Amino acid sequence: MFDPATFIAAKKSGARHPADQIESFVKGLVSGAVADYQAAAWAMAVCFKGLDGQETAILAEAIADSGARLDWPLPGVRVVDKHSTGGVGDKISLVAVPLAAACGLAVPKLSGRGLGITGGTLDKLESIPGLRVGLDEAQLRGQVAEHGLVIAAQSEAIAPADAILYALRDVTATIDSIPLIAASVMGKKLAGGAPTLALDVKCGRGAFMADYDDAFALAELMAEIGSAAGVAVRAYVSSMDHPLGRAVGNSLEVAEALEVLSGGGPADVVELALTIVAGLLRDSGARPAPRAAREAAGRALESGAAREKFAAMIEAQGGDLAKFQAHPPHSRRRRIEVRSAADGFVSGIDARMIGEVVRSLGGGRLAKDASVDHGVGVRICAGRGDRIAAGDLLAEAFVSDASGGVVADSVAAAFELSSQPALPKPLILGQVLRTASDADP
C-alpha cells in the first residue's frame, strides 16, 4: 500500500523512487489520497534532492496517464506539436502553427494562459472578437481534420495531475525545479498525442530560465523524456534577453503576427518561426532534407498560404478577424510616446522590465483566475542596434488609465544606451535533437 509520508521521506533522504511509487503518487494526487500538503512537501524535497532522468520520465508518463490521452488517426498526415516555455513578446505559436499547417502538417495545439510577465497564447487569441478557445474533443478533431490546425485550451480531462501539482508549486516556491518543469511540460505534451514535437526553451532576462546552462539542461531533459516515450523532439534554446519582435501585449502581438503572416514583420519573429517549422518538417519526415524543409516553410509564408490557414482557424473558432483588424483593442487605448533623454545606440532592451510594465497595465496576471486587458501593451520603435538622438521615439505605450508619466519612465528605463553600436547576438543559442530511436533499449 502506498504511504505518502514514506514516499516524501525517501526523497528527503535522497533515495531514488521506483516506478510503481511514482505512479501511485500521481494517482493519489488525482484521487485525493495524497493531500495538498504532502504533495507540496514532496515537491520541496525534489527541489533539494532532485530526480534523475528515469524518475522524471516516469513522472511525465504518469502525469500523461492521469487523464485522457489524445490520438490523431489521420491517414497520410503527419501530426506535430510545438511548445514554448514562455517569454516577453513571444507570439511564435500564432505564426508557426498556421505556417506548419500550410506546409501540410496537422497541428493540434493545446495552449495555456499567461502568468506573470509571460504572455499566454490563449489570451492573445481572445483579443479577436468572438473567438472560442474552449473546444470539446469532437470539435478539436473535426477542426484538425478539416483545416489542419487548432489552438485551444487544454481540457481539464487532460493531465489533471499536472494542474494539481502546478498549482501547489506555484504557491510553495517549488516552481524552479528542472525535473518538475520537464515532467509538467512533457506530461501534457505526451497526453496531446503528437509524435513530433518542437520545444522552444527561452533563456535570458525575460525568461523563466535566466541561465543558459539551466535552459540547456531543461531542453535536454525534455528531449530525453520525449525520446523514451517514442516522440521525436527538437528543443531549441532561444534568447529572451530582449523582447521578441516589436510588440508586447495581447492584441499588439496578434497584429504583429498578422504582419509576419502577410510577408512583413520583425526579422527575429520570422526567423524563429521558419526555423521551428523547418525542424518540424524534417523531424516528421515530411521534408527530411534541411534545405528542402526551409524552402517549403519559406514558400508557405511568402505565398500567403500560412495567413490563409490562420484566417481559416479563426473563422472555424468563431472569431471575427476583419473586426479585429478594423478596430483592434489597442486602438481603443490611450497612446503614450516614450522618447529618449540622450543620444546613443540602443545596446539592449530589458525584456523583464518591459514585461513588468505590460503586466502592471493589466496585460498580464498575477493569479491564474485574473482577467487581462487585451488592449494594453508596449510597441518598441527603436530596436537593438539602432542609433538614436535625444528626443527620438523609443516606444509607444498603450494604457487604459491616467498613469502615463509613470509608464513612460518605466519603459524608458528598459532601454540601455551605449556610445558604440551593439554587436549582433544570436537568436538561437543551442538545440537538442532526440528521435524516438534514440531511446535506451
Image (cartoon, rainbow, N blue to C red):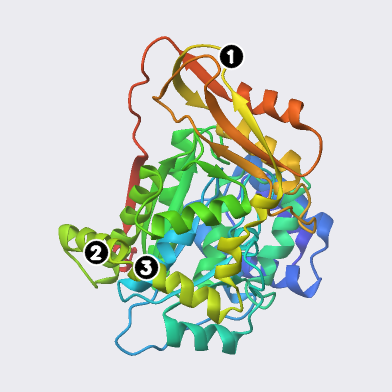
Q: Residue at x 60, y 74 (%)?
A: 319
Residue identifier under label 3: 306
Residue identifier under label 2: 299
Q: Residue at x 54, y 26 (%)?
A: 393
Foreground tag (3 vs 1):
1
Q: Please provide percent x and percent y for residue 193.
A: 47, 76
Residue identifier under label 1: 341
Relative to 109, does residue 217 appear above or below in the rendering? Answer: above
Q: Residues within 10 Å of mark 3 (few under 14, many from 20)?
A: many
Q: Are marks 3 and 2 in contact (CB under 8 Å)?
A: no
> For the residue labelled by badge 3, is the local secondary structure a helix, a strand or a loop?
helix
Q: Residue at x 54, y 78 (%)?
A: 315
Relative to 326, does residue 432 appear above or below in the rendering? Answer: above
Q: Nearer the viewer, residue 425 or 18?
A: 425
Q: Please provide percent x and percent y for residue 213.
A: 44, 35
The quadrant holding residue 408 is: top right
Foreground tag (1 vs 2):
1
